[in-house]
C-alpha cells in the first residue's frame, strides 16, 4: 500500500516538475531580466547600511555582497560550465533563503503594526523564491550552457 502511494506521489511530482520546467523555459527572458533587477535591488541597500557596526547588519551586508557577486558572475558568463552550475546552485539557494526570510519578516511586520498593506508586498518574496527555483531548475536542465 505504501509503495503504491509513493509511486503515485512520485508520478505526480514528476508531472508537476515537467510543467514547472516548461513554464520556466517559456519565460526564460523574464527570469534573465529578473536577475538584473535583483542585482540592482540588492546593491541599493548595501550602501545604506554599509557604515553600521551592528553584527547583524554586517552579516546581512556580507551575504548580500556575496549574492550580488554570484549573480554578476553568472550574468557576465565568465566562468566554466562546472563553476557556473555551482554558482547557480548557490544563487538559487540564497534566493530561496532571502525570499523565505523576507516573507517571514513581512508577516511579522504585519502583525506588529496591524497593517494589511504589507500582505500585498508578499509578491516580492514570492518573486525572489520563484527566481531561486528557476536557478535551481536551470542547473538540472540540459540547455543551461547558453543561458545567463
Image (cartoon, rainbow, N blue to C red):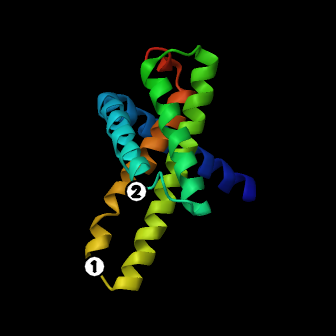
**Image height check: is 106 above or below 42?**
below
Q: Residue at x 50, y 53 (%)?
A: 98
Residue 39, visible in the rendered structure:
yes
Residue 54: x percent and y percent? Answer: 57, 63
The quarter of the picture where the C terminus appears is top left
Q: Residue 25's x, y, as percent?
A: 38, 29
Question: Which residue lies under the disc numbered 1?
Answer: 116
Could you tell whether 26 is left or right of 78 in the image?
left
Which numbered dot is residue 16?
none
Judging from the image, what secondary structure is the residue with disc 1 in? loop
Q: Is residue 12 left or right of residue 42?
A: right
Quadrant position of residue 5: bottom right
Q: Which mark is residue 125?
A: 2
Label 2 Cα crowd, 10 Å radius (few <14 / some 14-19 / many 20+): many
Res. 120 image quadrant: bottom left
Quadrant location of the N terminus in the rendered image: bottom right
Residue 147 rendering spot, x and y as whole percentages: 43, 20
Amino acid at each position: 500500500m505504501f509503495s503504491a502511494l509513493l509511486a503515485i506521489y512520485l508520478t505526480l511530482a514528476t508531472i508537476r516538475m515537467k510543467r514547472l520546467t516548461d513554464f520556466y523555459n517559456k519565460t526564460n527572458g523574464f527570469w534573465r531580466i529578473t536577475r538584473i533587477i535583483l542585482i540592482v535591488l540588492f546593491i541599493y541597500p548595501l550602501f545604506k547600511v554599509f557604515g553600521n557596526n551592528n553584527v547583524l547588519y554586517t552579516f546581512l551586508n556580507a551575504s548580500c555582497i556575496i549574492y550580488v557577486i554570484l549573480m554578476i558572475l553568472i550574468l557576465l558568463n565568465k566562468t566554466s560550465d562546472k563553476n557556473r552550475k555551482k554558482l547557480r546552485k548557490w544563487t538559487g539557494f540564497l534566493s530561496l533563503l532571502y525570499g523565505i526570510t523576507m516573507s517571514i519578516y513581512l508577516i511579522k511586520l504585519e502583525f506588529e503594526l496591524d497593517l494589511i498593506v504589507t500582505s500585498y508586498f508578499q509578491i516580492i518574496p514570492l518573486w525572489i523564491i520563484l527566481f531561486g527555483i528557476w536557478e535551481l531548475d536551470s542547473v538540472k536542465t540540459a540547455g543551461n550552457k547558453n543561458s545567463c
